[in-house]
Image (cartoon, coloured by chain):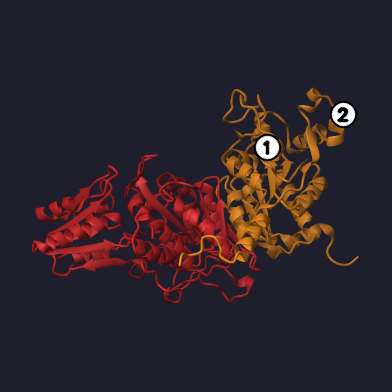
Chain colours: A orange, B red
Amino acid sequence: MSGPRPEERIYEYLRHKKKFPNVWCPGCGIGIVMHALVRAIDRIGLAKDNVALISGIGCTGRMPVYVDFNTMHTTHGRALAFATGLKMAKPQMNVIVVMGDGDALAIGGNHFIHAARRNIHLTTIVVNNQSYGMTGGQHSPTTPTHMLASTAPYGNVEQPFSICNLAKAAGAAFVARSTVYHATELDRLIELAILKRGFSVVEAVSYCHTTYGRMNKLGTAVDMMRALKERSVTQEAASKLDEAEREDRIVRGVLVDRDCPEYTDLYAEVIRKTKAAAKPLGSPRP
Amino acid sequence: MQGNEACAEGALAAGCRFFAGYPITPSSEIGEILARRLPAVDGKFIQMEDEIASVAAVIGASVGGVKALTATSGPGFSLMQENIGYAAMTEIPCVIVDVQRTGPSTGLPTSPAQGDVMQARWGTHGDHPIIVLCPSSVREVFDLTVQAFNFSEKYRTPVIVLMDEVVGHMREKVELPAPEAIEIVHRLGTDVPPEWYSPYDDTPTDVPPLVSFGEGFRYHITGLMHDRAGFPTERRDEIDDWLRRVFGKISRHVDDISMTVQEGVEEANTLVLAYGATARSAHQAVKLARARRRKVGFLKLLTLWPFPESLVEHLADGVRSVVVPEMNLGQLALEVERVVGRRKVRRVNRADGEMVTPRQILEAIEEG
């Protein structure tokens, strides 16, 4: 065997000499998502120069610092809007967006549904730890009802969003879910998402053992990881469960894969038609 | 041609090829015209879900190497402040047009005002420099929109074109310059190899070169305080260096950025300082006062920020009073008072959605 071992190939994609160690707590799942993303990019064979990784604010928002792509750490919730502008300026570029659940669905919820509605070719990865980790374990739009959070000291009275159902309803072309326990499944789903022409969402179910997990007495990172393994089921297995049994399960796999016109393709067509017209609409009056 | 139309034409002439915006009166025509015109020149238009997203998309496009614009009015301008700060922090060129209407909040849709002068300067949080240009005629809208792009590219900064409802909706007969007569500035590139490139390097002009994403340089952009390479830093020395450089890149070039129109200022004993639509009333008042043999000078500011304090100080030196009419309750007057002293300044204010009249200004001149 020649060349670097598979686990060393990742160095090619990391700013490992400059920017490590990272900011994440020991045992955090975000690093697993980052590694899965890099494996997916490596497998597709994307040129690093042609990949942009855009993030918002929060623990997941710090990911772009560590990878050797065109990277942009934007404002809270707005990553998809920045990515939309970049994608329109550079339609050939692979624009990938990573966000946490609070970033994507609370402050960025409006941008999330509208990016999905436009079906613009952005690959969106939402790391879902059901809470705001960086600010200290406040409840987020995906915190289950009754669970404790630093801003839900008597239990969360709100009902959570399903990231995947929201993305599906808003018009995303590709929606998939896995967990940070299922690392190799995660990279395959991310690979499919990048290759999909249109707006794609991969929900990576993770955990925060330092704040949310501690408050809810969910154990160590290992315990929480084990819970992901035990609670999750494939779609096939899920179909055999009744509704009550399915309630608490994490259903993994490709949930939506549909072909619908992509935004930058449609806009390219607008440009083509406008330029082809002998007298373009709106040209200066004589 | 209408003011908003001249803004769209100016943007196209300056090389703007991306517009992201959200509809709001009295600025909507700018987006409507660009939605029609941009595809014909390989440009792109997108209507975003709100004004926050609009500035974000504009910055994203600019990072992709495309000159980009958004346009709004007061309520939308408030929402834009978040990402205007991001553009200032990351030094990404972009142009934001605010066609002012009476506020606060939904205010008086859509009567004119000049109530966003301080918001344009200080609207986003934290210390940052900004360039704000303010036209008072349709031709000036065209010229200053071109200039806004040029400044944003030259100084790697967001630039705000502060119009008002009168200027935006006013129709005037204008002759636009021939395309070849228009000076167009592009951001500074680099000839260093990617591994040597620092997007926030110290340069003699204080403005570092900016390379677009996707050109082999793979650098990092963040709204966090960052070092010269663009990566987050908490080192006080690096933060201090950054602050001094970004303020320096504007303050050291005030003479280049400041644009004014001056008439009879040398022999005056009263100076009228005005901007935007109010400068039209002010100019009329000055003409009437001169007809009465008053020695009145007229100073129109086309650049509001950075405030041309040396110039104002110099021109106010020999006069008894400085009359500052504004369609607000005194915003730029605060700056004039800071420079020339409160006793000299005669404010003429109105914020009820009507223009300040020449008569009101004339009365202030007569009071001396």
Give x and y (percent) for residue B150.
Answer: 44, 68
Q: Chain of mark 2?
A: A
Q: Is residue A36 left or right of residue B189?
A: right
Q: Which residue is mark 1?
A: A166
Mark 1 touches mark 2? (CB < 8 Å)? no
Question: What distance separates the C-alpha of mark 1 from that of mark 2?
Answer: 24 Å
Residue A73 visible = no
How packed mark 1 is, by other alpha carbons closer than 10 Å (few <14, some 14-19, many 20 or more), is some
Q: Is residue A20 left or right of residue B280?
A: right
**Where residue A268 is drawn, which disc sits there?**
none
The C terminus of chain B appears in which quarter of the rendering? bottom left
Q: Describe the element under mark 1 as helix, strand or loop.
A: helix
Q: Which residue is mark 2?
A: A240
- Front-most of B37 and A161? B37
Give x and y (percent) for residue B320.
Answer: 12, 60
- Front-most of A14 and B236? A14
Residue B195 position (above or below residue A133): below
Q: Is residue A22 left or right of residue A78?
A: right
Q: Chain of mark 1?
A: A
Q: Residue at x 35, y 61 (%)?
A: B138
Give x and y (percent) for residue B309.
Answer: 27, 62
- For the residue marked with disc 1, what is the amino acid? Leu
Residue A24 position (above or below residue B315): above
Residue A9 visible = yes
Q: Is circle 1 on the same chain as circle 2?
A: yes
- For the residue marked with disc 2, what is the amino acid? Lys
How packed mark 2 is, by other alpha carbons closer than 10 Å (few <14, some 14-19, many 20 or more), is few
The N terminus of chain B appears in which quarter of the rendering? bottom left
